[in-house]
Amino acid sequence: YKERIAEAEALQEYGLRRVLEDILIMEEEHARDLMTVLGQ
């Protein structure tokens, strides 16, 4: 997602960039939640 965010910014597609950032944030939160549940 980070690569796509940079591409969207380069193309001045700020709406798309925002959506991709939101997805990235959700994915990172999900990964942290999994680590917490799994005790790692």
Image: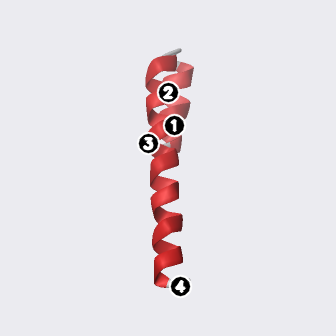
Residue at x-position 56% and y-position 21%: 10
Residue 23 — which label?
3
| Helix, strand or loop at mark 4 | loop
| Helix, strand or loop at mark 2 | helix
User: Which badge, 3 or 4, comes first in the chain's sequence?
Assistant: 3
Classify the position of the C terminus by image quarter.
bottom right
- Measured from the top left, where is residue 24 in percent x and y? 49, 45
Give the residue at mark 1: 21
User: Which badge, 3 or 2, comes first in the chain's sequence?
Assistant: 2
- Measured from the top left, where is residue 18 in percent x and y? 50, 27
Q: Residues within 10 Å of mark 2 (few under 14, many from 20)?
A: many
Question: Front-most of 29 and 24?
Answer: 29
Question: Front-most of 24 and 4?
Answer: 24
Q: Residues within 10 Å of mark 3 (few under 14, many from 20)?
A: few
Disc 1 to disc 2: CB gap under 8 Å: yes
Residue 39 — which label?
4
**Farthest residue in the bottom direction?**
39
- Measured from the top left, where is residue 2 in percent x and y? 53, 43
**Farthest residue in the front direction?**
37
**How many marks can you see?**
4
> Distance from label 4 to label 2 (Cα)?
33 Å
Amino acid type, residue under disc 1 in the picture: Glu
Amino acid type, residue under disc 4 in the picture: Gly
Give the residue at mark 2: 17
Is 9 on the left-hand or right-hand side of 16?
right
Residue at x-position 45% and y-position 53%: 27
Disc 3 to disc 1: CB gap under 8 Å: yes
Disc 3 to disc 2: CB gap under 8 Å: no
Of tags 3 and 4, which is closer to the observer?
4
Residue 36 — which label?
none
> Distance from label 3 to label 2 (Cα)?
10 Å
